[in-house]
Image (cartoon, rainbow, N blue to C red):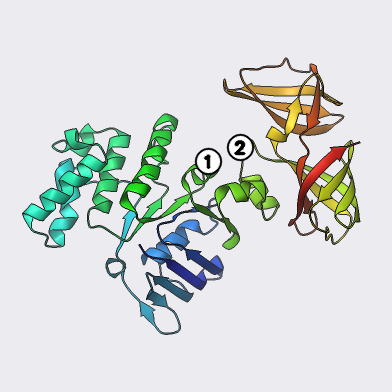
Amino acid sequence: MPEIILKHVTKRFGKFVAVDDLNLTIESNAFITLLGPSGCGKTTTLRMIAGLETPTEGMISIDGKVVFDADKGINLPPNKRDVGFLFQNYALWPHMTVYQNIAFGLENLKWDKKRIDARVKELLAMLRIEQFEKRYPSELSGGQQQRVAIARTLAPGPKVLFMDEPLSNLDAKLRMEMRTELKRLHRDTDSTFVYVTHDQLEAMTLSTRVCIMQNGLLQQYAPPLEMYNNPANLFVADFMGNPTMNFIDGTAEVNGATAQLTFGSLHGAFTAKEPISLTGKDVVVGIRPEYIRISDEGARHANVYSTLPAGMETTVKLDVEGTMLTAVVFGDVDYPVDCPVKFDFSKTAILFDKATGKNIACGTLELK
């Protein structure tokens, strides 16, 4: 399976820069998610790799073959790049059966009927839609149509499969089921998947690596759990995780790998593994909600501002002398609004430089 390399890729629409000097290596057989808010450049990046959009500058290669080079004037069309594209709109032919929709592209490629039949039957079985082969798209549910669209895209055996928010039209339960199917499909096909979404949960659960973008700029490119536990900056930390990380403005007195922190109404000693480099005294302390523990043994006092029970877990907003914190309590637990509780930190925290927004240290935090 191919490796995809982007070098100094830029896309401008007039004066607007949609993608700015992007360097990216997508490894063979990876499941890469391009993640970010609307307008960040993720779909434009996907379309440039697929050949549906022409970069302004840079070079793109797929499987060692240069498919675009602005300096050399190389720009291969999509049908020469050996890629498949799955759109948000499934775009199935309404007058064709499931079988005919899957076979349509193979007929255009002049495959013989026996080979087409074998390939269609293989895909029907792989995606578990054999019983629908004689039905029309209007007779299928959204999830079934999605599987037909995937089968049609996989039919010619593309080296790379591009997907642009393919699950956004499905309800929450069906999206979860299709995530499971896509992850298994990635293993079964041994293909390279490049997936666009603004849903960080999809990125976390599906990807081998996540490429998170903001305003056309790459913010971080890493495995999802690494990005969650060690975000490059405040934007990544805020975007990855639901409920989002707690951010508390504060000041720090740094001494080597330790810092004395004053943040909100709290004070603490922060210890990192390496010396802390800070441009000034202003910092942002980042603490994940699951690292705030509510218990009768807690050393700190707070009042419950609100709760969001969801069965398996409850999201609790705490008012700590005017500082708002979000905690997650696992299990079917609920608290009355304004009731007093005790809490503590399970030490893990991240220190961000407020001036630059960059992650300057991951470490342990002891409250005083």
At a point 82% along the width and 45% down the height, the residue shown is: 249
Where is residue 108? Give x, y as percent.
15, 60
Residue 341: image quadrant is top right
Q: Amino acid at mark 1?
A: Leu
Which residue reaches farthest front?
Answer: 273
Q: Circle 1 sits in a helix, a strand or a loop, which is it?
A: helix
Badge 2 crowding class, 10 Å Cα cut-off, few under 14, some 14 to 19, many 20 or more, is few
Q: Circle 2 sits in a helix, a strand or a loop, which is it?
A: loop
Which residue does the numbered mark 1 point to in the structure image?
Answer: 201
Residue 358 is left or right of residue 276, and the answer is left
Q: Is residue 172 above or below residue 355?
A: above
Residue 108 is left or right of residue 343, and the answer is left
At a point 29% along the width and 41% down the height, the residue shown is: 147
Residue 287 is left or right of residue 150, and the answer is right
Q: CA distance from mark 1 to mark 2?
A: 8 Å
The quarter of the image holding the C terminus is top right
Which residue does the numbered mark 2 point to in the structure image?
Answer: 242
The label on residue 289 is: none
Where is residue 141? Give x, y as percent.
28, 32
Residue 75: image quadrant is bottom left
Pick the residue in front: 244 or 128.
128
The quarter of the image holding the N terminus is bottom left
Q: Is residue 328 above or below residue 133?
A: above
Badge 1 crowding class, 10 Å Cα cut-off, few under 14, some 14 to 19, many 20 or more, is some
Q: Is residue 81 above or below residue 165?
A: below
Q: Earlier in the sequence, mark 1 or mark 2?
A: 1
Instruction: Tell me if label 1 and label 2 are in contact, CB under 8 Å.
Output: yes
